[in-house]
Image (spheres, rainbow, N blue to C red):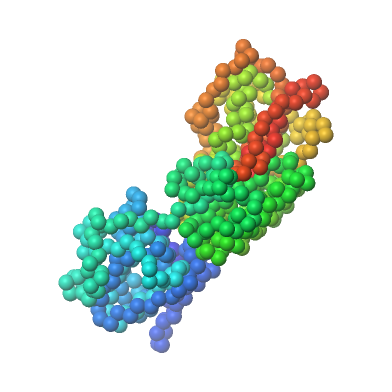
Amino acid sequence: MDLTIERTRIPGLLVVRRPVQRDARGWFTESWQRTKMVAAGLPDFGPVQHNVSHNAARGATRGVHAEPWDKLVTVVHGRVFGAWVDLRAGEGFGATVTLELDESTAVFVPRGVGNSYQALADETVYSYLVNEHWRPDLTYPALALDDPTAAIEWPIPLSQSEISDKDRANPRLAEVTPFVPRPALVLGGSGQIGSALRRLLPDAVAPGRDELDLTDPAAVEALDLTAHDLIINAAAMTAVDAAETPDGSRLAWRLNAELPAQLARRAAAAGATLVHYSSDYVFDGQREVHDEGEALTPVSEYGRTKAAGDLAVGVAPRHYVLRTSWVVGDGGNFVATMARLADEGRSPRVVDDQWGRLSFADEIAAATLHLVASGAPFGTYDVTQAGEPMTWAAIAREVFALRGRSRDDVTAVTTADYEAGLGERVSAPRPRHSTLALDRLVATGYEPADQVAALRDHVVSRLVPRTSTTGGGPRTSTNVGRGASASEPRDQGVSGLVPRTSTTGGVPRTSTTGAEGEGN
């Protein structure tokens, strides 16, 4: 028998089937084997305390308790009938799962799910690993063993069972105050991904730039992380070209490398889960498709700072690095710029030899919560839209068509042509290929939408058309280049999206400083 992990109707409640070796002496099994179990799909929950419960007589019954920690329950001797009730706030409140356990079966119980069991044999020994230390001042939801809504069918009638007075006094489901997890902490909450996260996490704590200066290490060190189980870092310095300058480089190293390192160290100490967003810029773009196992080969200063941040986050045992590309959300970004130019009657020149896929902020936020809620194995995940890779020019043409303009109003140029028109302006190298592999994300049960479908939905539903002031028709040639606004969010206003018009060789050109999505 191989080690297997089975999901149940209660999200996060997992059944572990373990191989047991038996001979004339008895049996042996690996009760907790971190490497094997995490690889099989068990959350890397970091146990810190081991509890053992001895049940002298058949019929001893305990629960239903929803403690504020995760636990892995096993049977060391005897057999038990286990029952679990979801006491977490939400649609699943009151859902019940029952199962008989012996030495070959374990159950992972996420915090907030009520745990209970009944001994089916004398001298039953029940064991559980937990990832927080017990404290006498703890309070948590509990449920009556005979609650009619949960309707647990106990093998031994409760009238014939040994139950503590405390458990007999537990309330019915209608009287239970649901377990509410500690709120997530979102840093960079004013950016594109941060804003999308806040819509999905309305109770999250998201300090603004007037409350927390992320460029100040002392301010970050003073953050109280004990009130949060989940820390999401959506802050970054994303001005790719500015990062090539001395001042921009210092700021990029602070926000993209030092800040993630600080958060990783502190999250590890607090036992919290850390989510961090990475970029296709950590690769040189030579491969057509980049997967999570590819060596980091950044070619720009911005890319080097993001690669350093990725490595630093790995210090936290409970971490997710979500690598994105060409991010689009609310506010300024490449898609919004193309829509505006189409509405104004302009005809842009756009790079047509850089390939990738868009990543909509709403998709990234949804994938983030999926990975966390499903207990997906910690590590790095590529997160973009699905579908065939496209160039910036192809995306621009799609936006123009959605605005009622001709696709031919977008002129394709090479990266070399674009850079030749920059004059003395600093231009950081970009990856030619930014397409990220989605296999690992899809294997967790999450499938992103196709990028063309997502683009159409975004343009139609989120970008209100502007009335042209030029009387319609193409007005000028705008050299937008390479998705100058398609990147991750940032707090602090360190790389604000400020379109400006300049003239190169007599041709008006729109450029974007610190494109909020240009560096991902």
Out of 474 and 138, give the one closest to the viewer. Answer: 138
Q: Quadrant of residue 268?
A: bottom right
Q: Which residue: 44% across, 80% down?
A: 28
**Identity of the residue furthest to the left in this view:** 159
Q: Position of residue 355 (x, y in %)?
A: 67, 38
Q: Position of residue 84 (x, y in %)?
A: 32, 63
| Visible residue check, residue 64 | yes
Q: Which residue: 68% across, 16% down?
A: 475
Which quarter of the image is occupied by the N terminus?
Answer: bottom left
407 vs 244, left or right, is left
Out of 62 and 39, give the one closest to the viewer. Answer: 62
| Visible residue check, residue 438 | no
Q: Which residue: 61% across, 49% down?
A: 213
**Identity of the residue furthest to the top in this view:** 471
504 vs 280, left or right, is right
Q: Is residue 462 positioned above or below 277 on the image?
A: above
432 vs 323, left or right, is right
Which quarter of the image is occupied by the C terminus?
Answer: top right
Q: Is residue 64 positioned above or below 245 on the image?
A: below
Out of 201 and 349, give the one closest to the viewer. Answer: 201
Q: Position of residue 288 (x, y in %)?
A: 68, 45
**Identity of the residue furthest to the bottom in this view:** 25
Out of 489 and 39, give the one closest to the viewer. Answer: 489
Q: Which residue: 53% across, 38% down?
A: 450
